[in-house]
Amino acid sequence: MDVMSRSTASSVQGSKSAHPATRAGAEAPADTTAAADAGVGSDFLQLDIGQAPPGGRTAWLADRLRSAIADGRLPVGARLPASRVLAEELRVTRGVVTEAYRRLAESGQIAGRGRLGTVVVAAPAPPRARATAMPRTQDHARAAAPSGPGAALFGSGDREGVVDALRALPSRIDLSPGVPDLAAFPRTSWLRAERAVLAGVTPADFGYGDPRGAPALRTAVVGWLARNRGIRADPDEVVVVAGVAQALGLLGRILAADGIRRIAVEDPGSLGARQQLEYGGHEIVPVPVDAAGLDVGALRASGARAVLLTPAHQFPTGVVLDGERRRELLNWAADGGTVVEDDYDAEHRYDRPPVPALRALMPEGVCYAGSVSKLLAPALRVGWLLVPQNRLDAVVTAKRYADLGNGILTQLVLARLMDSGELERHLRHVRQRHRRRRDAMLRAIEKHLPGAHVHGAAAGLHLTVTFGGPPGGARGDGFRDTDLAAAALAEGVKAHPLSWHRITPGPPGLVLGYAAGPAHELDEGIAVIGSALRGLLA
Amino acid sequence: MDVMSRSTASSVQGSKSAHPATRAGAEAPADTTAAADAGVGSDFLQLDIGQAPPGGRTAWLADRLRSAIADGRLPVGARLPASRVLAEELRVTRGVVTEAYRRLAESGQIAGRGRLGTVVVAAPAPPRARATAMPRTQDHARAAAPSGPGAALFGSGDREGVVDALRALPSRIDLSPGVPDLAAFPRTSWLRAERAVLAGVTPADFGYGDPRGAPALRTAVVGWLARNRGIRADPDEVVVVAGVAQALGLLGRILAADGIRRIAVEDPGSLGARQQLEYGGHEIVPVPVDAAGLDVGALRASGARAVLLTPAHQFPTGVVLDGERRRELLNWAADGGTVVEDDYDAEHRYDRPPVPALRALMPEGVCYAGSVSKLLAPALRVGWLLVPQNRLDAVVTAKRYADLGNGILTQLVLARLMDSGELERHLRHVRQRHRRRRDAMLRAIEKHLPGAHVHGAAAGLHLTVTFGGPPGGARGDGFRDTDLAAAALAEGVKAHPLSWHRITPGPPGLVLGYAAGPAHELDEGIAVIGSALRGLLA
């Protein structure tokens, strides 16, 4: 993977920074290298490694360097210390420094200059907009370089918190991925089950409980996974968690305790999952995804000892890990690799039954995480985590210290809905609604975005469109998808730029959720995007 | 603090280990030092520091050494490498090794022997009982050295998970502290509020929300804290968390990111809170508690930059931090110290209104955590965390990556119960019940434990009894409180030995919860403890 060949710094280049951005890897103008010998003192930036969080030295160092570039302490043209020198000064391994430098090179702020060393080539965009009210601006849809809060949000090189910030902005039509039909939430069934739970719960149930979760829910989850995902498990193996996000946090912690600090992820893949792992101090190792799913050969070559993937319905491309790749992956696991299976939306399949979970094939090599976020509602914050026996104690301990276990009432209500069959009835009901909405979105894309390629529409709650090439391809179409998303947002329509979920650059695209809103909104939302696209290309 | 002067290893000494335990700091018998030169190879125990969790190297090393002593790889008499040598081999600071050695010395497993170095002096008790069913044994109450699952539980030198293990054991009468009257849980009010919530909640509320929690609950918490704890805050400053346990985990993380790795705690103080911080990689700095609360002079002398304390009702001694100490503590905070205020049960005060929270006096120096665990039920897993403005962003980020926020329905129901005044009505109701139960327990103690000193009965949900001295004093009464708790458990009565919550040894005692069960059980439970005590002293 040639990370230097094309910078992800497009957003930096699009900023209104006073410093013209320079593409990483291109020749630097003479005036930026002239300052190189200004030199950086031995107590470089007064960095104090003692301030770095446990396991997060690379992220900490990268952040400090970014701050110094942003506030002018490291101006464009300044030379950074050689990685070996800085590593010695900070008493860290050289890998920490080279990786921090690599991240800044990827974001286009520094670049290698041969014998001149590593120099600052671009100051970043202004700080990202906080999640505050967005004034409606009607006149930006056709501007080639959008401005306003949406532009600041999408234009920031810093992706941290960007999904939350987008979520907090108001919009007319929300095509963000990852949310099911929330209007269909079974309120009546929920209240009925809650009444039964409150009538039957014992005083002891209200006390401190098993950190693994309520036995009733663990038993119900076992039944659910057997019926829907082909997984055989014992209730003692199930740990109830606060969604897949928490599951990844707990797993990250115990993998780090086993000395596993590099985790491979799909590229493109979920930005949120990646940020979660990075916050936990892990180094992310991108592995390409093609039409058969994760490239297991590339995984093997990467040397990573653990991989996080979405085999049933890859996020965001929607491909299913095919049979050959599944066999390769299980061989890799049998050789000692740890597979983390994020089974976030596998129950939503429209053409045929979902493929069984990897966990069903190999309980001993696969950590499995799922949740009710796509079945019922993300706001319930309930999921489950199954790990191989040799990691179970560590996961239970991590869950205990995280929060002593999930809240009891929501657990017991869910257990009733699973045991009674009501959750499966709900799933069949929303699956029909989701399918109709998917069809409406496909029609709208055909009408308003005739040149777009559609990916992953056979399952899930979202699809991905790309412009000018396949999602794993290399050729773009001359515009930035962040600009397209910003222009759509200026017209009140939210969608995720595909580049948010990419590590290695690729053609522009959008990730479009279709499950949450009614069909007529889908048509209107895609029409706004089509109009914004024509404005960008005009 | 002279940690070597009296080992906390009483539990080890009480085990049925084949190796007679030797008190740390006493002279070692010649036969244990004779093996000292057997020597330990340069790849000592094949320790691989890469397996240590981030920030947890000391705990990891101590654990590996304990395992090696337990399984015989390090027999009694074996000499440990010099700390400087082992630190170099492991590529850790020498402080990591000396601190791990100190912990094993405290638990009586190793001891310094002058020029002979550090040697193993005692093998530990057998592994603690897992949380499984306990056979009722009727004949141990009078045995001077109890055996059975209770004895294994209480006799283990390893306190990790011991509270969970005790919780999972069956009992006739549970006097464990920390649980309110759970039979009084307001089921009818809860269901009524849930019905209103489900009728009014919007589809968007079921989506991914603000990681800080539902605005309705944050607003309700602000009102609650103003009315009950004298705290003025803005809803934007409140972060809803999954109980105080999660609050401590999040705070520990951001303090570590600020370079604060040593956290002072009250001694005696909550075992659970201490374990939580240690799991997060923090070094615990014990600070004595006397009749006026935490010794702030000792805190200042310790050099710790953060302190966790329970000023309104110290756990477990029940003392209130007095006015002079509060002023000293706030001066310490004004000089840059960070105060973490665990306000776990301040609303339960029987003689007069509770003292205001420290947070009410100094919002900028105090991180404040509270929960509904003692108001309603621990199993709800809802609490709140208020931090100074300069730490707010870091806490919100930590909460986001922990679990994306608490579950919505429980939050909205709680908000209604707070706003409607029903939670305050419930509190008044259970406060009366708790007071009657406290009085019943005081009568029972007078009757069945005539020699015991009672502490902290003016507030809260528990009291502490000591035998032979004040809780912060130094003199014991010739028996171990773990043996007393084990003997009581053998008769079906659970209580916490005070020594679980001590760091520095002190007189034996018990921490006795009185809020959870009916008055007649309290009398019976204390009678069983009295009988067990007479058996021990006979």
Image: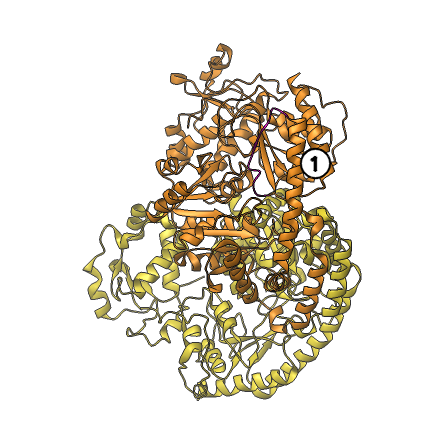
Chain colours: A orange, B yellow
Q: Chain of mark 1?
A: A
Q: Is residue B5 above or below residue A467?
A: below
Tell which residue pokes out farthest to the top in this image: A30
Q: Is residue B258 above or below residue A202?
A: above
Q: Is residue B94 magenta?
A: no
Of the pair A362 and A261, the residue shown nearer to us: A362
Residue B469 rendering spot, x and y as whole percentages: 52, 76
Which residue in the structure is indicated by mark 1?
Answer: A522
Does B211 sit left or right of A227 as displayed? right
Which residues make up the magenta segment? A450-460
Of the pair A107 and A54, the residue shown nearer to us: A107
Task: Report the predominant secondary structure element of the magenta stretch.
Answer: loop
Residue A128 rendering spot, x and y as whole percentages: 64, 31
Quarter holding the N terminus of chain A is: top left
Q: Is residue B199 above or below residue A5?
A: below
Q: Is residue B275 visible?
A: yes
Of the pair A455 and A339, the residue shown nearer to us: A455
Residue B115 rendering spot, x and y as whole percentages: 25, 58
Residue A134 rendering spot, x and y as whole percentages: 74, 33
Other-residue count near label 1 (Cα within 10 Å), few / some / many at <14 / 14–19 / ≥20: many
Quarter holding the C terminus of chain A is: top right
